[in-house]
Amino acid sequence: MTSIDGETIDLAGYRGRVVLMVNVASRCGLTPQYKALQTLYETYRNRGLVILGFPANNFRGQEPGTDAEIKEFCSLNYGVTFPLFSKISVAGDDIHPLYAHLTGRETNPAFAGPIAWNFAKFLVGRDGRAAARYEPKISPDHPDVVAAVERELKKLSPVEELGKRLFFDEKLSSPEGQSRAVCHAPEVGMTGPDAAAAAKVVRAADYAGLFEQVWGNGSLAPEKPADEIYVLVAKSIAAFERSAEANPFSSKFDDFWRAAKKAGKEVGLPRNPDNPFYRMGSEWNWENYAAENRGKHKVPTLRNVDLRPESGFVKAFGHNGFFKSLEDIVHFYNVRDVEPGKWPAPEVPENVNTEEMGQLGLTDEDEAAVVRFLKTLSDRLR
């Protein structure tokens, strides 16, 4: 497909997401549905919904503009940010193959039939199959449409379903029989056997067919290296752990991260040339093992550092809970060595980091900014 900006877009890139496809027009009595479409997109996009708009001039010439004119109209009048595509035909002899598939009795028998007017809607599930069809006059904010979107979003995509099957496979634990359903919560991650043992288990599992459906024919072939299969196992489990079923939360920082990536900004930290690990011998330097273990380990984070069940709840900070607010612990690490008599002696003096912490030189405004940032890391429902 060609985007409204002239870029080639492979619709396979939306695999695993819930997609609402709509043939749109700028001079139709139903054109105000753009507003409801944008609202629906903003409400559910972080949970996996994408809306695809396909301008079409099939009905009484109600989409006569160029792609550039259509894009400007949608942006200025309705603030549209969901993907729009170059104008196509959705009916007649010159019907685009996509809509020939969506309306064909052999290719989509449950929802077949010609498009009658602008703003017909096809809802496609995470598995790539049509889940519902709505006629033009049914608005995107209609309760039936919203309920169907909610229902499809709760379903796992094929790779997420595969990850779930792998995650809870008792034979993939080490030692065998310690199902992650019993001893590990999803956020802990996978702890399983080595690559060869894992590949043997997966090849014999009842979900082997699903594995090849997700990762392609031959992905479990006997000649396939066990290490490569192990990587696919890790990627599958990671997909499940990211799913709404395993992790139904988001945060303000996630919004910032997505916006930064969309804007093409580099938000990752650069390599620190002063870090001694880059100069260590290979037997000590874990960089050589990073690629093959990517996604297989979890590390402590500051996520939910200030999450509490209610605003008045007192939360403790530090390994022994000495501090009772973010403000206190941030201030402590900022001026600990500048005001040494202000706090009791350290519990374990050998653990005190005096090179990087204790005199950060932050102003009161700087401390407040750090605290505000830390509070953005609290989870919320997606």
Image (spheres, grey):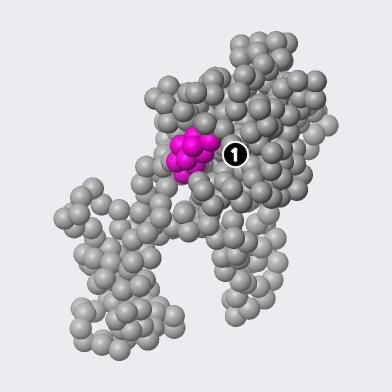
- In the image, farthest residue toward the front: 60
* Quadrant housing residue 382: top left
Q: Is residue 82 left or right of residue 343?
A: right
Q: Is residue 162 left or right of residue 348?
A: right
* Residue type at numbered disc 1: Ser
Q: Which residue is mark 1?
A: 26
SS for callout 1: loop
Q: Nearer the viewer, residue 118 or 358?
A: 118
Residue 184 horizontal/vertical position (percent):
44, 38
Up-down: is 259 above or below 46? below
In this rendering, does residue 345 appear at all?
yes
Magenta segment includes 327: no
| x 65%, y 66%: residue | 285
Residue 24 horizontal/vertical position (percent):
61, 34
| The N terminus: image quadrant | top right
| x 61%, y 23%: residue | 117
Residue 317 horizontal/vertical position (percent):
28, 63
| x 69%, y 43%: residue | 65
| x 61%, y 11%: residue | 110
Magenta segment boundaries in residue numbering: 31-42
- In the image, farthest residue toward the bottom: 338
Taken as a whole, is the magenta stretch helix, strand or loop? helix
Up-down: is 57 above or below 105? below
In this rendering, does residue 349 appear at all?
no
Q: Nearer the viewer, residue 360 or 104?
A: 104
Within 10 angstroms of label 1, few (less than 14), some, or many (20 or more) residues?
many
